[in-house]
C-alpha cells in the first residue's frame, strides 16, 4: 500500500475514535490511548484485506489471460484500469497488451513518452499496486479464483 493509502486508513481510524469515544463514561485522559488503538485496528483490518487480495491480479501474462491461460473478462480488467491516471493506463496497456502484436517493452514505452526507462518502471509499479488494491480486485477474485 502507498503512504497515502495508509494515511487515509489511519485518518478513518481517527474519525472512528472521535465518533465512538464516550466522553461521559471515560476520562478525557484516556482519549489518546483510545485513538491509538482505533487507528492501529483500522490499519490491521485494511492490511488484512489488502493481503487477502494481493494475489488476485498477476501481470506475468497478457491482460487478456488469467494464470491458467484462460481468457479473462476484458471489461472487468478495463474497469480495474479506471483507478489509474490516463498516463498509468496507457503504460499498463502498452506493456501488458491485450494482444501480443502491440505489446511494448519498457524501453519502447519510455521512448513513446519521452522519458527514461526508470521513470516508466516506477510508474508501472505504482499502477500495479493501485490495481491490486482490494477495492479494485474484488470482481476479478471470483473470476480468477485460487
Image (cartoon, rainbow, N blue to C red):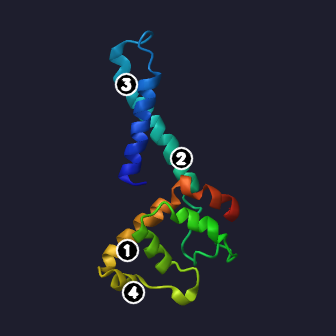
N-term-proximal mark, 1 vs 2: 2
Q: Are marks 1 and 3 in contact (CB under 8 Å)?
A: no
Q: Is residue 105 above or below residue 11?
A: below
Contact, CB < 8 Å: mark 3 with mark 2?
no
Q: How crowded is mark 2: few (under 14 residues within 10 Å), some or many (20 or more)?
A: few
Which residue is rendered at x = 37% and y = 18% of the image? 30
Residue 24 in the image, given as x and y percentages of width and height? 43, 9
Mark positioned earlier in the residue sequence (3 or 4): 3
Q: Which of marks 1 and 3 is nearer the N terminus?
A: 3
| CA gap, disc 3 and disc 4 | 52 Å
Crowd around label 4: few <14 · some 14–19 · many ≥20 (10 Å)? some
Q: How far apart are marks 1 and 3 (CA)?
A: 41 Å
Residue under the image location 37 percent in, 50 percent down: 4
The local secondary structure at tag 1 comes to helix
> Could you say which quadrant of the image residue 56 lies in?
bottom right
In what quadrant of the picture does the C terminus appear? Answer: bottom right
The answer to whether residue 23 shows anywhere in this view is yes
Task: Give the residue pinned by disc 4.
Answer: 108
91 relative position to 70: left or right:
left
Nearer the camera: disc 4 or disc 1 = 4
- Is the residue 36 above or below the residue 46 in the image? above
- Residue at mark 1: 121
> Which residue in the structure is indicated by mark 2?
48
Closer to the chain start, of discs 4 and 1, is 4
Amino acid at each position: 500500500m502507498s503512504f497515502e493509502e495508509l494515511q487515509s486508513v489511519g485518518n478513518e481510524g481517527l474519525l472512528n475514535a472521535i465518533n465512538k469515544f464516550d466522553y461521559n463514561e471515560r476520562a478525557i485522559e484516556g482519549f489518546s490511548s483510545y485513538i491509538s488503538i482505533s487507528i492501529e485496528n483500522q490499519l490491521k483490518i485494511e492490511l488484512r484485506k489488502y493481503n487477502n487480495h494481493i494475489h488476485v491480479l498477476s501481470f506475468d501474462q497478457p491482460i487478456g489471460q488469467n494464470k491458467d491461460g484462460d481468457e479473462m473478462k476484458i471489461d472487468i480488467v478495463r474497469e480495474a484500469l479506471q483507478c489509474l491516471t490516463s498516463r498509468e493506463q496507457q503504460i499498463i496497456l502498452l506493456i501488458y497488451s491485450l494482444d501480443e502484436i502491440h505489446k511494448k517493452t519498457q524501453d519502447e514505452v519510455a521512448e513513446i513518452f519521452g522519458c527514461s526507462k526508470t521513470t516508466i518502471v516506477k510508474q508501472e509499479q505504482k499502477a500495479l499496486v493501485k490495481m491490486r488494491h482490494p477495492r479494485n480486485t474484488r470482481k476479478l477474485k471470483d473470476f480468477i479464483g485460487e
